[in-house]
Image (cartoon, rainbow, N blue to C red):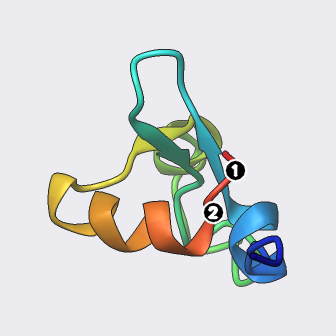
Amino acid sequence: MPKMKSVSGAKKRFRKTGSGKFKRFHCGKSHILTKKTTKRKRRLRKMAIADPTNVRQLNRLLPYA
C-alpha cells in the first residue's frame, strides 16, 4: 500500500492540537485593513478552532497530522 499524500494547501492552513482538534487562522487579515478597527484586527491575529463539522474532512486532507 503506497503512502497517502497530505493536501499541501491544508498543511499550510491547519495544525492539529494535542486533543485532536484543528487550529486555523481567521480570515480577513491580509488587505483592506485601514477601515477595520484596531480591536478587530487584534482579534483576527489569534488562532481559532475549526468547526467540528469539518474535522472529518480535515482528517482526510491531513492523514498524518
Amino acid on which disc 2 is placed: Leu
Q: Residue at x 55, y 38 (%)?
A: 47
Q: Residues within 10 Å of mark 2 (few under 14, many from 20)?
A: some
User: Which labelled disc corresponds to residue 64?
Assistant: 1
- The reply to whether discs 1 and 2 touch (Cβ–Cβ < 8 Å) is yes
Residue 52 location (% of width, % of height): 18, 53
Position of the N terminus by quadrant = bottom right
Secondary structure type for disc 1: loop
Residue 63 location (% of width, % of height): 61, 60
Residue farthest to the top, as pictured: 18
Amino acid on which disc 1 is placed: Tyr
Q: Residues within 10 Å of mark 1 (few under 14, many from 20)?
A: few
Front residue of 1 and 25? 1
Which residue is the site of mark 2?
Answer: 62
Residue farthest to the front, as pictured: 1
Q: Residue at x 52, y 54 (%)?
A: 37
Residue 34 location (% of width, % of height): 70, 72
Disc 1 from disc 2: Cα separation: 6 Å
Is residue 28 in view?
Answer: no
